[in-house]
Image: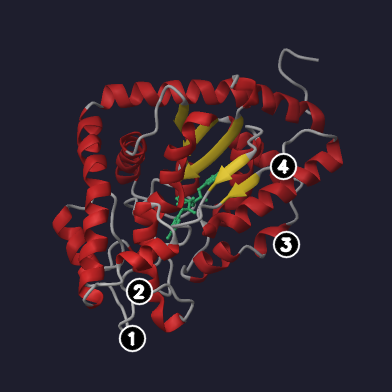
Amino acid sequence: MGSEAKKRVFSGIQPSGDLHIGNYFGAIKGWVEHQSDKENFFCIVDLHSITVAQDPDTLRDQTRSAAALLFASGLDPSICSVFIQSQVSTHAECCWILNCITPLGWLERMTQFKDKAGDQASVSTGLLDYPVLMAADIILYSAHEVPVGDDQRQHVELARDIAQRFNHLYGETFVVPEAVIPEAGARVMGLNDPNAKMSKSFADVRGHAVGMLDEPKEIERSVKRAVTDSHGEIIFSDDAERSGVNNLLGIYKAVTNKTKSEVEKDFRDARGYGDLKTRVAEVLIEELNPIRDRYQELIKDSDQLDKLLARGADRAASISVPKLQEIKSKVGLVLSGGP
Ligand code: TYM
């Protein structure tokens, strides 16, 4: 297949906090699995992270760490442009222009904003504007597909609305992107509270998340401690009371790529939830061990990592700089050195 025929993919990940298996199964694993037949842009969205307070040194470390973890998970730098959002200034510039055509009410309705703002004494303007920057990320690249976990569905919808509004106001400019949500692992729940999404914000809560870099012993401990129920049957279920077992089965399904009935068959002869937890921990450890090992190698060589990121940023700029010129021209800004 020629590169013209390849679908362009854009997705992003925040470098705030340790990446966990929700990020992995909801997003990264799919990026890796589908990379070879796509044209790929993956962005470490540090500008999104600073919408809430960050320690500067920690943010810098976590940004590099997130990049190393993406490569360690299997993204191939020869076919994926992995880059740091703040190193490509088109994103912030495009965001401003999109701000000017986005009704405030669209942003105030976003459920993630309402959830995040609810926790804080003081809310930054950036937090409200977060989904417009995300729309800029995506539509600057004319991306067709945005592979994300279920929690980003509403944000991608908003990016579609903004692209359509701009096209309506200024003529055909943007591709209207589609969210691509994985069949398994789209919503990994907290192990300590299977009715709440696994989240970096609760990374410090014991037994909430499995980090992508957790040692086998920690993984075992977290999974063993996972909340279950007293029913005892190991089957998928929509019953909120049984969401703990459902979550563990969902994680197992996401690792093994099996169907629901194959997963249930694997546990037909299990002796209770103890067996289920042992097996889930085993498959997770098997999946994450090689990633952790590759990560340890990559993070040591910061020059090489910075080179890969610089190359990713160059490739990203080669697409987004001309696109931003087109956008500026459409809205009537005078281009430097241009018409
Ligand atoms: P972030 O950093 O919160 O999450 C990165 C990816 O991981 C997915 N994810 C999950 N999937 C399943 N279960 C979970 N518990 C879970 N937690 C997180 C997210 O859905 C996401 O795909 N706003 C985005 C970053 C972003 C972006 C973009 C994404 C900025 N610009 C442009 C796509 C395109 C975010 O906060 O992701």
Of residue 254 and residue 42, the one placed in the foreground of this image is 254
Spot occupied by residue 294 in the image (x, y as percentages of width and height): 24, 35
* Label 3 vs 1, first from the N-terminus: 3
| Residue marked by disc 3 | 105
Ligand 1 within 8 Å of the CB at mark 4: no
Are the two marked residues, 2 and 4, in contact with CB atoms closer than 8 angstroms? no
Q: Secondary structure at mark 4?
A: loop
Q: Closer to us: mark 2 or mark 4?
A: 2
> How far is disc 4 from disc 3 in space, using C-alphas?
21 Å
Q: Secondary structure at mark 2?
A: helix
| Residue marked by disc 1 | 231
Q: Secondary structure at mark 3?
A: helix
Disc 1 crowd rating (10 Å Cα; few below 14, some 14-19, many 20+) is few
297 vs 290: above or below: above
| Residue marked by disc 4 | 176
Q: Closer to us: mark 3 or mark 1?
A: 1
